Image (tube, rainbow, N blue to C red):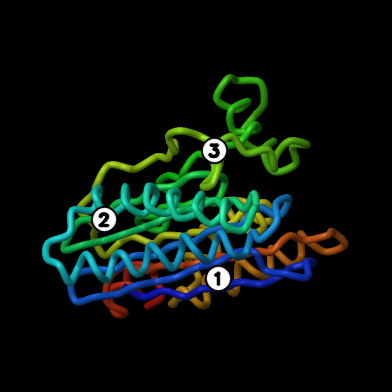
Amino acid sequence: MEYYVLSQTGGREINEDCAGVAETDQGFCCILADGLGGHDHGEVASALVTDLGTTLFQETCQAGTVRLQDYLEQCFQKGQEELVALQKEKESEMKTTLVVLAAFGNQIQWGHVGDSRLYQFRNGRLVRRTLDHSVPQMLVMTGEIRERDIRGHEDRNRLLRVMGADEKRLRYELSEPEVWDEHQAYLLCTDGFWELIEEKQMVQALNVSETPRQWLEHMEQEVLKNGQGKNMDNYTAMGIFLGTEVRRKKFFGLF
């Protein structure tokens, strides 16, 4: 696994995004969170759930065999419990999105809540992405607007599910576990990133990049171009390549 993380404040004073990675001999986890800007201490909320997830992965690996679904469920459930407890302590309404990608052995799985996204690519093509827990995404699913209308929708920041929401039971989504191969790439990113770059441009950048860093830097150029003259949000992205460098270069047609 090779990865690179990009995180910028955009046009804001504070970066409320957070990203973290934990690697062991058995596997890895990649975590990204976006503290809600409309609530106080968004940066504290995102850091809390990110740090908890990476620490939990390391502890779980040390304890023995990891069952990915159990690990992911603990990320969300324990993260929710600790965040709610901190809300009460700080008398704060801090909230955050959360997306987690984890691999152990030959298995890979992910989970998310909110509108921070995970994109999966295989053979240089986009395979799938997580669906936002937002009002515009709901409107797409009911056929009221088109997928491409999410980015400019007036309610794009209205989230239906997040970490720290006042709910008896946190509603998050987990993917089915998969056997990972060396022809895959993943992108985890906050809305400040994906709102300013379309999926076809993600694919184009992927297919001319040898490394995750090059991939993110190519995409960042597009994000900055499209964000010019706007009050840009914080933007954070994490690119992950699976496989050896030589196989990856051959796969992406670089020699």
Q: Quadrant of the N terminus?
A: bottom left
Residue 226's spot in the image, x, y percent?
A: 76, 59
Write the residue at 24% across / 57% down.
180
Write the residue at 36% across / 75% down.
2
Position above or below: 6 against 33? below
Q: Which residue is mark 2?
A: 108
Residue 140's spot in the image, x, y percent?
A: 60, 27
Q: Amino acid at mark 1?
A: Leu
Q: In the displayed image of the protein, which residue is found farthest to the front?
A: 89
Q: Earlier in the sequence, mark 3 or mark 1?
A: 3
Q: Quadrant of the C terminus?
A: bottom left
Q: Is residue 215 left or right of residue 210?
A: right
Q: Amino acid at mark 2?
A: Ile
- Rounded to the nearest whole Å, what is the CA distance between mark 3 and mark 1? 28 Å
Q: Which residue is mark 3?
A: 161
Residue 64's spot in the image, x, y percent?
A: 12, 66
Write the residue at 27% across / 42% down.
176
Residue 109's spot in the image, x, y percent?
A: 29, 51
Query: As rendered, which of 90 and 251 lies closer to the eye?
Result: 90
Q: Amino acid at mark 3?
A: Arg
Which mark is on residue 216? 1
